[in-house]
Amino acid sequence: MSTRRTAAYWIAFCAVQALLIAAPLVLPEFWRRFLTEVLIWGLLAMSSDLLIGYTGMISFGHSAFFGLGMYGAAAALLLVSPPNLWLAIGSGLIGAAAVALFVAYFSTRLRDIYFAITTLIFSQIFYVIIFTWTPVTGGENGLIFSRPPLSMPFLFSMRFTSTTLHWFVLAVVTASYLILRRVTQSPFGMVLQSIRENEGRTRAIGYPVERYKIVVVMLSGLFAGLAGVLYAIQNRFAAPDFVYFLISGDTVIFNVMGGIGTLVGPIVGAGAFQLLRELLSRLLGDQFPYLIPLGIVFILIIIFLPQGLLGFARRWLNR
Amino acid sequence: MDAVAQLLQSIPLDQILIQTINGIVTGMILALVASGLTLIFGIMDVVNFAHGELFMLGAYIGVLVLSGTGSFWVALIVATLTVALLGAALQIVTLRPLLGRDPLTTILATFGISLVLQNYALWQFGPVARKIQEPITSHFHLFYLEYPWYRLLIAALSGAIIGGFWLFLKFGKFGIWIRATTQDRVMAQAMGIPVPWVHTATFAIGAGMAAASGVLFGPLVGVNHTMGLDWVLKAFIVVVVGGMGNLGGSILAAIFISLLEAYASIWVSPAQAVIVSFVALILTLLFRPTGLFVPTPK
Amino acid sequence: MSIAANHADPLVLVEDLHAHYGKSHILHGVSLKVARGEVVGLLGRNGVGKSTTLKTIMGLVRASEGKVALEGRCVTGLPAHKLARLGIGYVPEERRIFRLLTVMENLRTGFDRHGVTEARKQALLEKVFAFFPVLAERRHQAGGTLSGGEQQMLAIARAMMLEPKIILLDEPTEGLMPRMVSQIRQIIDSLHRDGVAILLVEQNVPLTLEASGRVYIMEKGSVRHTCAASELAVNDPVIRQYLGV
């Protein structure tokens, strides 16, 4: 690991952080919220990258983790008064973890394509349950609740402004990134990548591949759930749409566009996607189906640029 | 004894019979859709996420041709052929370049195609559902219901198409080519079979089958840009439960699952009845992951 | 690079062929040739690249460097199905017949080509059944139900349906009983008499030396020795050097 490269990496990191911290102070309201949402989608995409990029397991089930995180937080915010931020985060994570456990079990028994399809179907199962169990989940209309204050027990309590919320989200996402980066660079992460390269050989060498898979699915699910919690806090509602498998699809798009196996790539992919969507709808009008050109771009990237936008920097980012 | 008698009395036999027929009708259409999907997977190892959209496009083309010519049958044929050609084109342009790469990429590529097609349909046709007029509107009496003949016609036609395809596979030069390619792509090539074209043709056939299902099913529901989504999920469940690549298995699984769902809808709402298929999937994955109707490999 | 077929050219000419499996460099510049109607043996220990050589000639493995020419015409990089139609037949290790197809259907995969008349198809079938009467008896049986020896015969028969100018035979006697081995020997002779060239990869050294006119010996991905089969005895030091344990 050359020190110059590491230094360059951290300088870039700090630069990006500085920009993101300063952003809400200079951007108009709309773009402030836009940026915050990009960070949240980025976290979701990053969690999915753990599975897709590092372990080689394509999952279309992230919408389930995300959605359950969202509803878990909603539950805490609605049931406990006064609404408590940390409780919301906790309960969201528990919700996501429960789903993750379920998916993790099946992940160990299914390979590739079967796993992908099954995760997709699972997210649909949760969608149906949430959609139809109206008394508990609010059904089609979802749940509305209020945003909890940022509070430290006995220390202080203040309402979030859109700026402070942005900083909070930024802090959570950055912390998640650093944690995940640590994980992917640890021996554990190396084994994951070895599983991606050649599962059979990894197992033959003696690694308990199943256990690794369960852990990585749980981790991935937790961070995806965290993203769901953040989304719930930011937008103050939870809706079944977010559990629909299309969200998983979007997530996979962010991953591929940004570059799998880089952790940062998916965040960039999320940003690029949202930005393109916003631009297209401004340039060509609300009615324009922005997903058509975006979809085509996506397909082109898969064919011609399978490494994604940041793929070329993959080794550098993983130092 | 009393309890049994009570239980038997509470079972609504007439409803069961009705739902059996409904289940078989839906099952046959599902079988047609799933056949295309499992064929494509069996031969090319491609999970075609866009299959539902091909179904949807078939229905839309059916709407257009029907309003243009007034004939349901012409609409059916034109839609099938057009979508088959579209399928071939899509395969050549987007899937051939991905040959030999990670199977992951084909899932993503077909997912991308499904997005594009879905939004194209939304753009061109708008969000309001269209209607296809069925060719036969007469009914017959089934208990207290006026049961439409058309539904039985759908089941029969789907069966005929599947049957015809099975015959095509069994006899005829192309049938042998397809079967050989499914079993051993490499040796099929070594025998002079132009495997890339077999792939394209298979994709086209699968697409055509999906389109035909779309037109046939169209009159039962509205034709809408999202109609493909639900079908694709069900079709995937059917394909996994029936055994991926197993044509006979998919057909049996399609009917089996549709029957279960139909029966379930006697007691719960249709939106919840779909849980039945999910349960079937989970059980299959847990106990017979190669497929419910596939003999367990020795 | 297509030149009109020159009868002075060898049937198959392989020049400096390199091939990789992923990152492994398997073939390091293989060169050999097979003349019309010749039976040529390819010997070497396990893993030296004999099968890979056949596969690369057949277009099933991509050549990273080097050239393969058929009747003077450069065919490197052509897909396998085109090579099959140009007259190269391939009988792989493990036979790989289509297990779920009947014997008849297996044979038919080879002769539904352009410009083959019904009459010619019939003649081909009869010839193949004459070579392998057992297959005629079992013609409607599924390939997977045949015994090992019968499957080997089917694999060769199937290749013959292409009316090939050369057959690439990969370890045809592997796993077969001695009686079957001598049958394979006779089949190779019959094919030779019929004018079909054969490139034979085999572990069975005596068989190869008997059946072939010339042999090549490979080691670590390239050809190290070549001579007429008659110049080598089974216990020759050369044989021991390259094939000894």
Image (cartoon, rainbow, N blue to C red):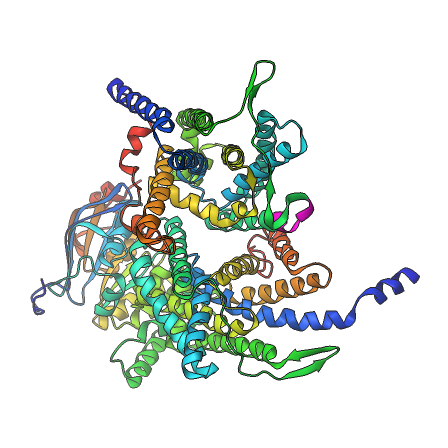
Residue A1 drawn at (x, y percent): 29, 21
Residue A33 is inside the magenta segment: no
The prevailing secondary structure element of the residues shown in magenta is helix
Residue C61 drawn at (x, y percent): 26, 53
Q: Which residue is found at the position 55% from the left and 70% from the top? A: B29
Q: Is residue A74 left or right of residue B72?
A: right
Residue B59 drawn at (x, y percent): 46, 71
Q: Residue furthest front?
A: A28
Q: Is residue A169 left or right of residue C240?
A: right
Q: Quadrant of residue C125?
A: bottom left
Residue A130 is inside the magenta segment: yes
Location of residue B295 with respect to C194 vertically, above or below: above
Q: Quadrant of residue A73?
A: top right
Location of residue B42 with respect to B174 vertically, above or below: above
Q: Say if residue C101 shows up in the picture.
A: no
Q: Which residue is found at the position 46% from the left and 37% from the top? A: A44
Q: Say if residue A173 shows up in the picture.
A: yes
What segment carries the magenta color?
Answer: A129-135
Residue B69 drawn at (x, y percent): 41, 83
Location of residue A158 with respect to B132 vertically, above or below: above
Q: Which residue is found at the position 56% from the left and 64% from the top? A: B249
Camera-nearest residue between A187 and A101:
A101
Q: Which residue is found at the position 44% from the left and 48% from the top? A: A249
Camera-nearest residue between C88 and A214:
A214
Please state, as top left, top right, bottom left or bottom right, where the C terminus of chain C lies in the image. top left
